[in-house]
Image (cartoon, rainbow, N blue to C red):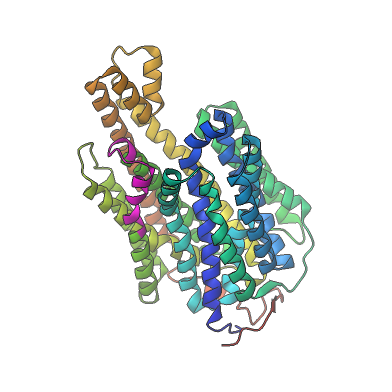
Amino acid sequence: MKSFGARRWLALGALALAGLVVGIDATVLNLALPTLATSLHASTSELQWFVASYTLVLAAMMIPGGMLGDRYGRKKFLIIALVIFGASSLACAYAPSSGALIAARAALGLAAAFVIPLSLSVLPVLFSKEERGRAVTVLVSMSMIALPLGPLLGGWLLTTYWWGSVFLINVPFVVIALVAVSFLLPESKSAKRRRFDPVGIATSSAALALLVYGVIEAGQHGWGSATALGCMIAGAFVLAAFVLWERRVREPLVDLTLFCSPSFTWGTVLLTMVSFAMFGVMFAAPQYFQAILKADAFGSGLRLLPMIGGLVVGAVLADRLTPRLGIKVVVSLGFALLIGGLLLGATTKVTSGEGLAAAWIAIAGAGVGFSLPKAMDAALGALSPERSGVGSALLQAVRMVGGAFGAAILGSIMNSAYHNALHLGSLPTSAAAAVRDSVFGGLAVAQKLGSAALAESVRSAFMHGIAVMLIACAGVALVGLVLTLAYLPRTAAAAEAEEVSGTTEEGEGVELEGEFSA
């Protein structure tokens, strides 16, 4: 492998900063939705599209984004994507109407569809197999830290400034990342110019968009929604058509033989399962802080700091233990910690203190820090530098669709358990509907009626819902632990992908531009 010297770590810092910005933007909007409803006079449907426009474009364009980076240059498209991301953030901050904000959010999704896979795709180019694990840990840890950091930063901005500041904060970070990528990252692309696969591009984009939109609709209107079911079924058929086409075309968009690699297949599956379980933490904890502990948005963000600490400690320890124990053991330890943290969280009662919350969130965060970067490293180990863009995009696309299903499924589990535990007595129909809608609606009704008994019932039912959902997350993590022990190779699939200095098994290489001496 060609040596890029110490500057490769500075280049990694630039990529990590770009990933941090994208991660924060993905989580910060939810806090601003109530304010946007008032400031832009947005309807419920428009509020949904503020989120969906970003998610759908991201899902549809991720694999084409990886392909274009492989074909024309990963650095080039990273720079273009960062410019679009910064400009779109400005457009979001000063959007005069709901329609303008929806369009700007779609442009943000387009930029993120390039940044996310291409940031990963340059790691097999910059780093040797011995260093790649540490590089993945740095990059993934920054993305994970963005999840709890988004509510913290967003809560402070919304408390201190106007709603546009949650988008405007992206701009200085993007500028720094843009300068750093421009000067520190070498250009790399496939040595062989492959033919375009327009059918593969169209079917992969349509399948991912339909599946994700169907899941979004299921989360909003229930799994029995005709639109949700129709989109998911159509997405499954289009996905099947995509796979059949890719198996017969001479130069496919996606190399499906990647799934013959145990490291790629199980690394991707386990990565998705960790993300599923982590969503349970991010979904339950802020609501608990606000509904039960009566914290505001900024206070909720502060209470997520133990999770950041757990993530960092877990990731650092995992990086040090992997050379001695192997990826299988480290990922297994991560799932075990995650299970312990989730089950501890499920014991939380209305009267539990903040100490218990800090403990289980930190333990769960440490479990994610152990398992997620190393599962991703296992999958990346099977990618050749020549097609790392498309491979990274495929990895992230599978994770994204799995995460979308997880969000909808866990939301349904929690709501169902909450409804089943409510005791509404003889409440009027409209009041009962408000109580069933959410814990916040229930507490508002109880306050209006001056009913301490109703408030207690709502809080207890809500904690029951959280417990059931966290137990379901722990069950998923337990399955992940079993699969890790049974199928994940002990070490990353270093032998399955050729190093940059050589060529792939097909005789193809990767072109590098720029000199990076040690």
Residue 376 appears left or right of 258:
left
Q: Residue at x 56, y 71 (%)?
A: 123
- Give the quadrant of residue 390: bottom right
Foreground pick, 460 / 467: 460
Q: Is residue 205 above or below residue 349?
A: below
Residue displayed at 43% across by 58% down: 145
Image quadrant in which the C terminus is located: bottom right
Q: Image point 42% across, 39% down: which residue?
A: 410
Residue 328 lies in quadrant: bottom left
- Magenta stretch: dominant SS? helix
In this view, the residue in front, 175 or 467, is 175
Q: Would you say residue 293 sits in the magenta stretch?
A: yes
Above or below, 166 relative to 427: below
Front-most of residues 246 and 104: 104
Q: Residue 114 lies in magenta, yes or no? A: no
- Percent position (x, y) of residue 458? 29, 27
Residue 108 in the figure: left or right of residue 340: right
Residue drawn at point x = 66 percent, y = 39 percent: 100
The stretch in magenta equals 290-308
Q: Position of residue 199 (x, y in %)?
A: 76, 50
85 up-or-down from 32: above or below: below
